[in-house]
Image (cartoon, rainbow, N blue to C red):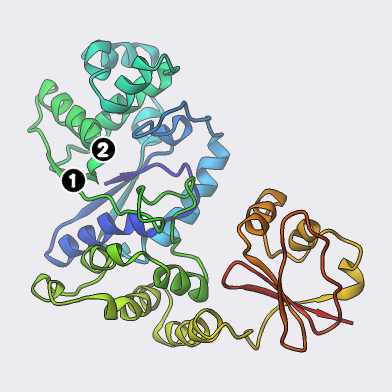
Amino acid sequence: MGFDPSRPDIHLGHVVGLRKLRQLQDLGHQVILIVGDWTAQIGDPSGRSATRSMLSHAEVLDNAESYMRQFFKVVDRDRTQVEWQSQWFGDFTLANVIELTSRFTVAQFLERDDFARRFADHQPIAITELLYPLLQAYDSVAIEADVEFGGTDQMFNLLVGRELQEMMGQTPQQCFLMPILVGTDGVQKMSKSLGNYIALEESPQEMYGKVMSLPDSLILQYYEYLTDVPNADLAAMGQAMEKGLARSITATFHDTAAASGAETQFEQVVQRRDVPDDIPECRLADVAELSINQLLVRTELVASASEARRLVGQGAVEIIHSSGDRATVAAGAPLPALAAGDVIRAGRRRFVRLVQ
């Protein structure tokens, strides 16, 4: 299996394939992890409607360190052989690149769905993107892969690798395609760029809350792809299992105590709409003259002004006065008078208390 460290974090969508790798390890198989420190600089165009920006090699190495730390939360490090693409591409010459590209045609690559759509819509396709499937395919040649793992959106790349192996006199690899996990929006595949992801290194409270907020239609799919519940039991499982799923996933990447604490906080904050006991504090004098958007950014309840505007527009920002009265902040309306002891809530699970 290979990965491109084009981003520093792993989400549950990646875990679907990693769990299968771990199962194969438990059956005695050796896993070879290829760190795509060359192809990550290009960026995999699979499923993309636009050209990706290129990363520096230093950015890729930083991402790889973070990525592998999370990778080995699922896959057994002692039974994994780690290889870096630079071991074989570091010595690649222009002659090697030309020889590799001569084995395929542009017409073949334009048969790929995402390239075909972009070509038909007159959207740009960089030459580097056409190279990406070739470089990934050569990984299979370099390690003489027997089986290559990937999501169903990777089928074209995996088949190019199989074809290239055969051209070079190797036994063509088998392609093991894993299903794509739908994100928390219940519509599109899980993706950080779409904001519908659950990251492995999120806090227990954030992870638990996101799982509990999944649409009912996704519950069984998440159980099937991300837990060890037997298939025979899945048909009998319904909406009542939502809480158990959140606890199971959170405990897997944190621990049982953290999952229990997150469950308690979810019941308190989301279901009963109480204010958590342990929340950050901010001096009233530091925010008294700020607009609501500035206040949300200053108190780190949001990461950006655009996120603040979005939450306010959705009616998801609330002032909880020390008296217990609540006031939703409306877009364009003046901010209610604030006092020490008031709590600002942004979204479902982010709070800050104002103090003298």
Q: Tell me if mark 2 has few (under 14), some (14-19) or many (20+) residues whose alpha carbon lies within 10 angstroms of its own.
A: some
Vertical arrangement, residue 316 with respect to residue 37, above or below: below
* Helix, strand or loop at mark 2: helix
In the drawing, does residue 235 fall left or right of residue 88? left
Q: Where does residue 297 sit, x and y in percent of width and height?
A: 75, 59
Residue 86, quarter of the rendered image: top left
Residue 327 visible here: yes
**Residue labelled with disc 1:** 177
Vertical arrangement, residue 53 with respect to residue 179, above or below: above
Residue 24, quarter of the rendered image: bottom left
Type of amino acid under label 1: Leu
In the drawing, does residue 206 fall left or right of residue 244? right
User: Residue 202 or 75: which is nearer the viewer?
Assistant: 202
* Helix, strand or loop at mark 1: strand
Q: Which mark is residue 154?
A: 2
Position of the C terminus by quadrant: bottom right
Q: Where does residue 321 sit, x and y in percent of width and height?
A: 76, 82
Residue under the point 47% across and 47% down: 194
Q: Tell me if mark 1 has few (under 14), some (14-19) or many (20+) residues whose alpha carbon lies within 10 angstroms of its own.
A: some
